[in-house]
Image (tube, rainbow, N blue to C red):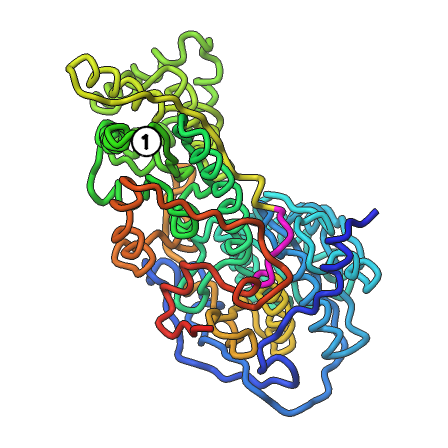
Amino acid sequence: MKSALQIARAAYQPKLPEALKGPVKVQEGKATQSVADRKEIKELFPNTYGMPLIEFVKGTKKKVPAFNVSVILSGGQAPGGHNVISGLFDGIKNLNRSNRLFGFLMGPSGLIEHNYIELTSKVIDDYRNTGGFDMIGSGRTKLETIDQFESGLKIIRELGIKAIVIIGGDDSNTNACVLAEYYAAQKYGVQVIGCPKTIDGDLKNAMIETSFGFDTATKTYAEVIGNIQRDCNSARKYWHFIKLMGRSASHIALECALQVQPNICLISEEIQKKDMTLDDVVTYIAQIVADRAADGNNFGTVLVPEGLIEFIPAVERLIAELNDFLAKNGKEFAEVAPAKQREYIISKLSKENAEIYASLPEEVARQLSLDRDPHGNVQVSLIETEKLLSNMVGKKLAAWKKEGKYVGKFAALHHFFGYEGRCATPSNFDSDYCYSLGYTAAQLIANGKTGYMASVRNLTAPATDWVAGGIPITAMMNMERRNGKMKPVIQKAFVELNGAPFKKFASLREKWAKETCYVYPGPIQYFGPTEVCDQPTKTLQLENKNAFKK
């Protein structure tokens, strides 16, 4: 049974850039190069390297032969995925009513295992403007072996598929690029197109202004943080430590801070830049707690990025050595009795890292040694950084109190907001943006492109003025260490400390720390004045110099 909101959202018609509303033609820009490691990337991707940027402009109507397309949802969920598929479906049907769309189920494994469904209008219409990835499911299988590529080719040939659209984050789109290169090298005639998805916001550049899902997720988190801050300001007796999604970058924490104005927001990139120790971070928080207590305010909010601990330089070096060691010696480590694992690791690390590991609370040290993610990295979401910080702040305040310093009363509560934002009903912005990305992917396919990521930019302007096109995935790539080996991957975008969003935050944080300046955004707005419903994130508004004012 559908809720009233689902019924109402089904009737919402996403907006499109003006250039996509009719026939298009390709306007090619300059040839591209990878962001780094150009020699290595070019050697690995000789067939898809150096392609030009693409922009779609108004064209003349021409007959397009019928073709079939497939789509894969890859990696973690992000609001708007269903609208990418809806836009892709409408886009190919607009080109030729005989075109068909197939969805591979549960991520890339569906392609390898030939598990699929045909996506008809009856299926699509039930999922328009809805959150989640449940239309076809998602998965984290990595497409990286020739056996996988050849297995996928069999079903591609059987279904007469011209192109695969892979909707995913940086790693998923890296896999899309590898697949595109292989099929191009073998001259199989199968196109591969990527779409930029991740709520973390770390897949972006000049052509990809934001990844889809970031807008909805941050507004969802901001709503809940605002609720907590209102409770905090009402009870006036708790410090709330709130960990937020964002393993590799602090974009979510920064955007939420700009929306809700917390007392403290830690930015991992700044902590790394300043070479701060864990004790430096704890002292910074404790001092603000004490200063607010002196004003009679024994309450506050602290936003903590999920990946913070990896950005503390000394801990980062420890984790890097742990990752390499466990990649090579995981089997031996697994055979060590749990009670002796801490001692075993200390005996295997370098002197500096062994000392740091030994100094960590036992629970945190244990969490650093847990099973790695598919990329061989520590699973930072399992590390309760918010509890580690509040515990250490409490100890620091107790020590100051013994020295005679007034620190007031300190009581902490903890929260982790992650899954709450991944499948939320997409905002108007994400509904429009994702639909446009899907439509753009359809045009990239129709124009014979492969190894491209769909791009829609100029996003702070009205949707009709958005610019649609494509960027070669190789243009975003560099070489990074994964599972102990150097591999080509899309370069992550970190919070720029010289960027407008961080500068805005930095100019206000001292005031927010001392005063209670909370903002309570309330629920995501779908209906009502455009100045409420259709606003992009503050990050985008600050980054885009041409931001329009309503």
**Does the rendering let one see residue 63?**
yes
The disc labelled 1 sits on which kind of residue? Asn
Q: Which residue is mark 1?
A: 297
x and y percentages locating residue 292 in the rendered image: 27, 32
| Residue 515: percent from left, percent from top | 30, 42
Part of the protein shown in magenta: 423-430
Q: Residue at x 52, y 46 (%)?
A: 223
Viewer-proximal residue among 299 and 418? 299
Above or below, 12 relative to 386: below
User: Dot 1, crowdedness within 10 Å: few (<14), some or many (≥20)?
Assistant: many
Above-or-below relation of 100 to 233 = below
Judge left or right: residue 396 versus residue 209: left
Say which of 322 and 127 sits in front. 127
Q: Is residue 431 left or right of residue 128?
A: left
Residue 486 seen in render: no
Residue 384, picture quadrant: top left
Residue pictured at 58% horizontal, 86% vertical: 25
Residue at the far left: name it: 403
Q: Give whichever of 39, 459 is nearer the camera.
A: 459
Give the image location of residue 533, x and y in percent. Answer: 57, 63
Q: Main secondary structure of the magenta part?
A: loop
Query: Mark 1 falls on what kind of element?
Result: loop
Q: Is residue 427 magenta?
A: yes
- Up/down of 449 relative to 250, above or below: below
Residue 527 sits inside the magenta stretch: no
